[in-house]
Image: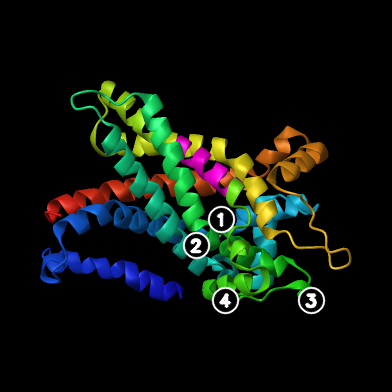
Amino acid sequence: KSIFLLQLLLSFSILLVDPNFFLKLGIMSDAWKAAKPFVTGSLSGCFATCCIQPIDMVKVRIQLGAAEGGSTNPIEVTKKLLKEDGVAGMYKGLSAGLTRQVFYTGARLGLYDIFTEAAKTPGEKMPFWKTTVCALTAGGLAAVIGNPADLSLIRMQADTMLPEAERRNYRGVGHALTSTVRDEGVAGLFKGAVPTATRAMALNFGMLGFNSLSKDLLKDCGVTGPAQVFGASAIAGFFASFFSLPFDYVKTQVQKMKPDPVTGEVPFKGPIDCAMQQVKIGGITRLWTGFPTYYVRIAPHAMITLIAQDQVKKLWGTLGL
């Protein structure tokens, strides 16, 4: 499934050979104009995910280990993961990750571009509060769209940590999705949607809001070109990590929880109850458990995504699209 998704995304390379591909198919230019922001976001996000997937796997294991009293040392977690599952284990859940990027990042970046374009006043620099509203709205809407794939990703990554008798043994993202619907109904696909949406809003605020702000500030300082793109994306990566980690931590705990086999009760009544229990156990800083690993995962992903998005946009312009 991972290979299929990559082939599907790479099929857009036909544009490099024939820029009139869409016109030959009889698709109206207005349709491509509407789809372009989402295609750009999807391609950028998938490229970044292929680069960052192993770090994401370690990040999830650290968060799950913290909740269950296990090791939170990234080196120890990585050694244990490689010993138990090999190198292939570092890419467990990649199919779900790519599916998530197609829907979530495609919508997140695409909607942000659409919203900011609509909010612009010709001849004026967009104020930060407008950028913030656009980023928060795009992030929240995109998270709901991508929640089923995000849920599948978390469960696939957490499955091997469960006792053998309790494992779901997913064969891929399709199996994870159908199993969830079969066991929990369609509503099960949106378990954890509230913390996921909240986390996405925080991430989008830090990533896209501060990327736009940083670009403007760097431009005012005379920094342009690749240095501006790289510098702004690095700043955005830090703020994206800082603002989103507490919500990501809670989201992970809520999405991977299972009912007690004896009582049938789940460990948390909801995301707020989960957050309160975690703070009670380890203080407010527990919500930032694994920040170094999370930063190493989120910041490069944000940077690669933003840089890739900038290059893809330039490509469309070169092709006259």
Name the kind of residue labelled 2 in the image.
Gly
Residue depicted at 58% across the width and 52% down the height: 193
Task: Please tell me which of labels 4 and 3 falls first in the chain.
Answer: 3
| Element type at mark 2 | helix
Q: Quadrant of residue 228?
A: top left
Q: Where are the magenta residues, as a range?
A: 195-206
| Element type at mark 3 | helix
Residue 2 in the image, given as x and y percentages of width and height: 45, 72
Residue depicted at 61% across the width and 62% down the height: 187
Task: Please tell me which of labels 3 and 1 falls first in the chain.
Answer: 1
Q: CA distance from mark 1 to mark 4?
A: 21 Å
For label 4, the residue is 175
Task: Please tell me which of labels 4 and 2 falls first in the chain.
Answer: 2
Q: Quadrant of the C terminus?
A: bottom left
Name the kind of residue labelled 1 in the image.
Asp
Q: Are marks 4 and 3 in contact (CB under 8 Å)?
A: no
Name the kind of residue labelled 3 in the image.
Ala
For label 2, the residue is 97
Q: CA distance from mark 1 to mark 2?
A: 10 Å
Task: Please tell me which of labels 1 and 4 falls first in the chain.
Answer: 1
Task: Please tell me which of labels 1 and 2 falls first in the chain.
Answer: 1
